[in-house]
Image: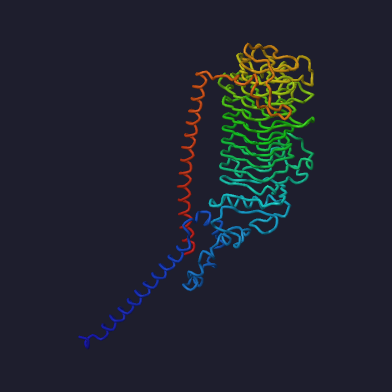
């Protein structure tokens, strides 16, 4: 048969040989593709996120055909040695500022300095540029959380520093952020603020110094919204602590319509308005701050609720610009019915030690009540010779305010006063605008178990002042005075109010001259406390349960948000890695 059909046999053999060659080629091609995939997958660490393979890192310019030609994709070029993690470092895939030698993928911090030894280097001019680059880098890389300012160094800024969510801006105590000379910024432009105008969360600012450079920017007036040091709007979970903030035009920290604000362990000296100013906020706490007021208050909360101001030391100085009250709680709208002010020492303030005021058109009892002021020390407050609304505590427009276990020594005007301030630049006068004063009746302030001594006449219009307690609004406001210890008050004990249970004797302080107001063992005021009625104890228990329930609800919401964010992040990471792999192939 072979002899009869030699051509057919040859054709068959040729076809078999061609098929074998094609099969061998396909096997080699498959082996090459599999080897390439394995080599590439070994380059992706388990903790690599979307931020490592973003569009900005794998742009069209980097993945053009000219870059990935056939000659570049040969097995010899795509070896494991050429595509190791050491060659694909963060420094090669992101901003040029982060040199490969300085970047440590496992580190959660990027550093800023003025010496060229860190990730970002400033030169003392427009230093917000490098600081913002560092903060933007943190915002784009979730595994990095912190920007650290090295000291000793002064970072001079000519524009705002912008911070994103889940970010810590910190530094050495010798690191100083300073506003430039003659900055000429518009009103409401702060030194440090949020990156996203819609709001941020999980932000901490701590550890360094902010110099507002007031004296070299005197073309702007204090207290009008210029050069606030830190400002957040519609934000939550904000902490500002262990800062030195001084010589400014505006606020140390201003928070608008925000939630969970903590301001603590700060040293605040001669700002242009308030150390902390919370406007329409919820859950605000300030403690362990040392504040010297200028222009306005040390701590201020307006239309805010769930407030705790405690363990602060607040004073002022004797000058026309020396400020207002040590602490100001104000209600014009919304609900203010959960405020605690305790364990503070407030002294030598230019205005009153504490000012509690509700004013506006009429409002219900539940909207302004249950402020608790206790275990505070007030001495020599109210030194301003140009206003009449000075004293220890001035209050009006609040229901069921409880003032207990405080010490008042040598305050001007009176220790506790019901009055509506007249003729201020902030509020309309009582006589001219009665519609803006508290229009209801039954505003009650309970004053019990306090020690009030050495009250002095105020400096402006002193006649009729110098009492322990004064009520200028007896038609609408009532005092309940119980178990207070009153002694050596220059005009007497009461004006338009009275008590049947107060004690009139020297309290026998351990060292009044040193402002040690502990009582000697033989003090007649020892044991003059007051037992809480059962109804109030129950009310406090219910309030505690309500707050705990609210906190649990908040935690649940935050947990759901974190879960959603985690799922979305994982999806984006997977898509990003796939896109990057396809681009490489």
Residue at the far left: name it: 1
Image spot of residue 395 (x, y percent): 66, 21
Q: Is residue 359 visible?
A: no
Q: Is residue 4 above or below residue 34?
A: below
> Which is nearer the eye, 185 or 367?
367
Q: Can you say whether 205 is above or below 432 in the image?
A: below
Specify how the rendered protein is coloured: rainbow
Spot occupied by residue 433 in the image (x, y as percentages of width and height): 70, 18
Residue at the spot 52% in from the left edge and 66% down from the top edge: 65
Q: How many marks?
A: 0
Q: Residue at x 49, y 71 (%)?
A: 70
| Residue 213 % position (x, y) | 76, 43
Q: Is residue 59 above or below residue 543?
A: below
> Which corner quadrant holds the N terminus?
bottom left
Residue under the image location 52 percent in, 20 percent down: 536
Residue lying at 65% horizontally and 56% vertically, measured from the top left:
120
Image x and y of residue 539, in percent: 50, 22
* Left or right: 576 in relation to 291: left
Whether residue 14 sits left or right of residue 168 in the image: it is left
Q: Residue furthest front?
A: 522
Image quarter for residue 452? top right
Pick the residue in front: 7 or 457.
Answer: 457
Q: Quadrant of residue 102?
A: bottom right
The answer to whether any part of residue 230 appears in the image is yes
117 vs 518, nearest the viewer? 518
């Amino acid at each position: 048969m072979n002899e009869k059909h030699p051509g057919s046999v040859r054709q068959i053999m040729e076809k078999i040989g061609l098929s074998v060659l094609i099969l061998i080629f396909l096997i080699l091609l498959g082996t090459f593709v599999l080897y390439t995939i394995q080599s590439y997958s070994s380059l992706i660490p388990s903790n690599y996120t979307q931020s490592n393979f973003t569009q900005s890192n794998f742009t069209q310019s980097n993945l053009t055909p000219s870059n990935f030609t056939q000659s570049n994709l040969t097995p010899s070029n795509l070896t494991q040695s050429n595509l190791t993690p050491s060659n694909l470092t963060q420094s090669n895939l992101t901003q040029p500022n982060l040199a490969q030698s300085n970047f440590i993928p496992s580190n959660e911090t990027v550093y800023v300095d003025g010496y060229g030894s860190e990730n970002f280097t400033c030169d003392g001019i427009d230093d917000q540029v490098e600081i913002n680059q560092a903060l933007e880098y943190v915002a784009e890389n979730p595994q990095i959380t912190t920007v650290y300012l090295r000291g000793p160094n002064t970072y001079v800024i000519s524009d705002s520093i912008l911070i994103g969510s889940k970010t810590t801006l910190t530094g050495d105590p010798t690191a100083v952020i300073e506003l430039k000379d003659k900055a000429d910024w518009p009103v409401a432009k702060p030194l440090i603020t949020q990156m996203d105008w819609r709001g941020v969360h999980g932000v901490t600012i701590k550890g360094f110094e902010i110099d507002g450079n007031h004296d070299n920017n005197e073309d702007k007036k204090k207290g009008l919204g210029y050069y606030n040091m830190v400002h957040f709007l519609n934000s939550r979970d904000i902490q500002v602590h262990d800062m030195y903030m001084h010589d400014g035009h505006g606020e140390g920290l201003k928070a608008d319509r925000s939630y969970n604000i903590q301001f603590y362990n700060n040293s605040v000296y001669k700002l242009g308005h308030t150390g902390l100013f919370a406007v329409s906020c919820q859950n605000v706490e300030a403690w362990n701050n040392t504040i010297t007021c200028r222009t306005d208050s040390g701590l201020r909360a307006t239309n805010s609720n769930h407030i705790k101001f405690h363990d602060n030391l607040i004073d002022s100085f004797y000058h026309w610009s020396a400020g207002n009250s040590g602490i100001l709680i104000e209600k014009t709208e919304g609900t203010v019915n959960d405020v605690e002010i305790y364990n503070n020492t407030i002294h030598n303030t230019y205005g009153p030690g504490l000012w509690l005021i509700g004013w506006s058109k009429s409002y219900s009892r539940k909207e302004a009540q249950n402020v608790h002021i206790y275990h505070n020390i007030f001495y020599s407050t109210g030194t301003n010779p140009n206003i009449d609304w000075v004293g220890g505590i001035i209050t009006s427009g609040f229901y069921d305010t409880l003032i207990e276990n405080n010490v008042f020594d040598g305050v001007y005007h009176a220790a506790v006063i019901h009055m509506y301030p007249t003729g201020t630049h902030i509020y309309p006068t009582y006589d001219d605008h009665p519609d803006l004063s508290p229009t209801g009746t039954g505003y009650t302030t309970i004053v019990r178990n306090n020690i009030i001594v050495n009250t002095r006449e105020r400096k402006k219009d002193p006649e009729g002042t110098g009492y322990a307690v004064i009520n200028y609004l007896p038609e609408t406001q009532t005092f309940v005075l119980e178990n207070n210890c009153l002694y050596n008050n220059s005009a007497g004990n009461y004006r338009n109010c009275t008590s049947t249970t107060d004690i009139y004797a020297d309290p026998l302080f351990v060292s009044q001259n040193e402002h040690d107001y502990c009582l000697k063992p033989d003090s007649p005021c020892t044991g003059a406390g007051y037992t809480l009625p059962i109804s109030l104890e129950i009310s406090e228990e219910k309030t505690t349960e309500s707050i705990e329930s609210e906190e649990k609800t908040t935690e649940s919401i935050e947990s759901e948000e974190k879960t959603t964010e985690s799922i979305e992040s994982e999806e984006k990471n997977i898509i990003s890695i796939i896109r990057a792999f396809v681009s490489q192939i």
